[in-house]
Image: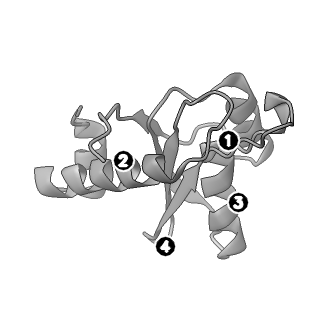
Amino acid sequence: MTESPYIQESFNLSLEDTAGLAALLEFAKQLAQPPISGFRVGAVAIGQSGRAYLGVNLEFEGMPLSQTVHAEQFALALAKQNDETALQHLIVSAMPCGHCRQFLLELGQPDLPITIIKAESRL
């Protein structure tokens, strides 16, 4: 697990809190449903309210991968559904693809801080 000093400094988190975010990310990753690629991605969006929203990638058998719901999209849509007006941070288990970066741009948050925490699956 990679510790991010940026997260710690930005949110005044202890190492234990940062480890908690990594554990939350790993939990989200395990909820992913990737029957086509087998590649699990988790995301945690931190809203202005301080609430965390989990996202996972969802693939649908018989459908092209272009119909996949990306973990970042899932987390951002969930935050929006819960009336978050903006996000403070996005934490993901893999580098956001171009599709997700475009999604962030179109939602008006092109400078949203993104941290990647590569955690090994333990479940």
Q: Residues within 10 Å of mark 1 (few under 14, many from 20)?
A: many
- The residue drawn where x is 46% and y is 53% is 28
Instruction: Give how far across and how far down residue 8 sits, in percent.
Output: 23, 48
The residue that mark 1 highlights is 70
| Residues under numbered marks 4 and 3 in contact, where contact means CB atoms less than 8 Å apart | no
CA gap, disc 1 to disc 2? Answer: 16 Å
The residue that mark 4 highlights is 49
Instruction: Give how far across and how far down residue 67 sits, in percent.
Output: 84, 38
Which is nearer the N-term, disc 1 or disc 2? 2
The residue that mark 2 highlights is 26
Q: Closer to the observer: label 4 or label 1?
A: 1
Which is nearer the N-term, disc 4 or disc 3? 4
| Residues under numbered marks 1 and 2 in contact, where contact means CB atoms less than 8 Å apart | no
Which is nearer the N-term, disc 4 or disc 1? 4
Indicate which disc residue 77 carries: 3
Instruction: Give how far across and how far down residue 72 sits, in percent.
Output: 61, 45
CA gap, disc 4 to disc 3? Answer: 15 Å
